[in-house]
Image (cartoon, helix red, strand yellow):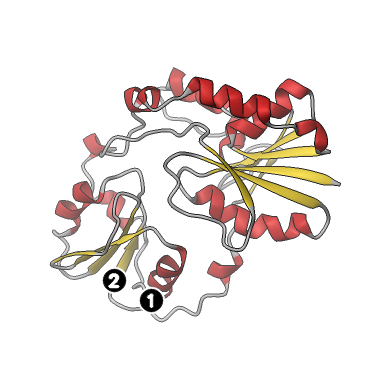
Amino acid sequence: MRILYGIQGTGHGHISRAREILPLLSNNAEVDVLLSGYNCKMSLENVRVMKKRGISLAYSNTGRVSLMKTIRNLKPITFLNDVKQLQPHSYDMVISDFEPVSAWAAYRAGVPSLALSHQASFISEFSPRPDRRSIFAEQVLKNFAPCKSALGFHFRRYDSFVEPPIIRSEILNLNPEPGNHVTVYLPAFHHEKLIPHLKKVKSAEWHIFSPSCSRNLEDTNILVNPVNNAGFLNSLETCGEFLQVAALKLVPRQCI
C-alpha cells in the first residue's frame, strides 16, 4: 500500500504529530511525505520530504489571524501548479494533516483521502466554537484542505470521529526535574508583545520559544529561543511546576 502523507508546516504542531504517526504508517505501508508552508521553521529529521510552498495562515503580532497578510502572501498560480503536478493516482490513499496541496490533488483526482488533524474535529458541529462565529474561520476549516473522510483530534471526544490529542513519545519519556522557569510556546504572539507582560512576574524565569526569533535573546528574567525541538524538550523537562499556558493569562484580552 502506498500513502501520501501531507503535513502543514505552519505552527509546528502538525510536524510534532507526524513524528509519532509516521513510524506507525511506515511499518504498514510505503509512505511519501509532502511538507508545505512558506513560514515553516521546523523539519522532520531523517525523513525524506517533498516541499511545496502551499498556503500558510499569517498572524498579526498580537496572535490574530491576519486576513490581509494571508492574502498578500498567497501565490495562487504556484499553488495550482503544485496541485496539478502532484500525481495522487500513484497512491492508494492520501492523508492530509491540514495540508492543502495533497488534499486538493486527491479531491480533484477522486483518490481516497483522510483528514487527520485538530482542524478536522471542527467538521463536527459539536466541537466548541466562540459565541460569535467567524465566517472566515469556518470557511477555512471547511475548504482549506478538503478530504472525503476525517479523523479529528480534540481535548474531548465531541463526536464519533474525534479522538484525544496525540502526545509524542519524546514528551512521555521525559524525566522531569522541576526548576524555576516557565516554558512558553505561543507562536501566534510575537515575543516582543509577550515580554512586557511576563516581566511583571519577577519570581519566575521565562523561556519563550518564538518562530520570530533567529537567535537567543535575554531580557532580565526572560530568555527568548528560536523554535527547535531539542531545546524545547530540555526546557519542558526542567520547567517549574507551573501551567505552561500561564503566560496567556498575563496577556491583555485585546491582544487575543
Q: Which residue occupies 42% across, 73% down?
A: 234
> Could you tell me which quadrant the C terminus lies in?
top left
Q: Position of residue 28 (x, y in %)?
A: 83, 56
Q: Is residue 96 above or below residue 171?
A: above
Q: Which residue occupies 58% across, 37% down?
A: 98
Mark with earlier residue (1, 2): 2
> Looking at numbered disc 1 in the image, what kind of residue is underneath it?
Thr
Q: Which residue occupies 51% across, 34% down?
A: 128
Q: Position of residue 141 (x, y in %)?
A: 54, 28
Q: Which residue occupies 37% across, 60% down?
A: 244
**Circle on res. 181:** 2
Question: Is 152 on the left-hand or right-hand side of 174?
Answer: right
The answer to whether the residues at label 1 and label 2 have Cβ atoms under 8 Å apart is: yes
Question: Is 79 on the left-hand or right-hand side of 65?
Answer: right
The residue at which mark 1 appears reads as 238
Residue, far top: 135
Along the line of sight, which residue is nearer the eye, 96 or 175? 96
Q: Position of residue 133 (x, y in %)?
A: 43, 22
Residue 242 visible somewhere in the drawing: yes
Along the line of sight, which residue is nearer the eye, 185 or 253? 185
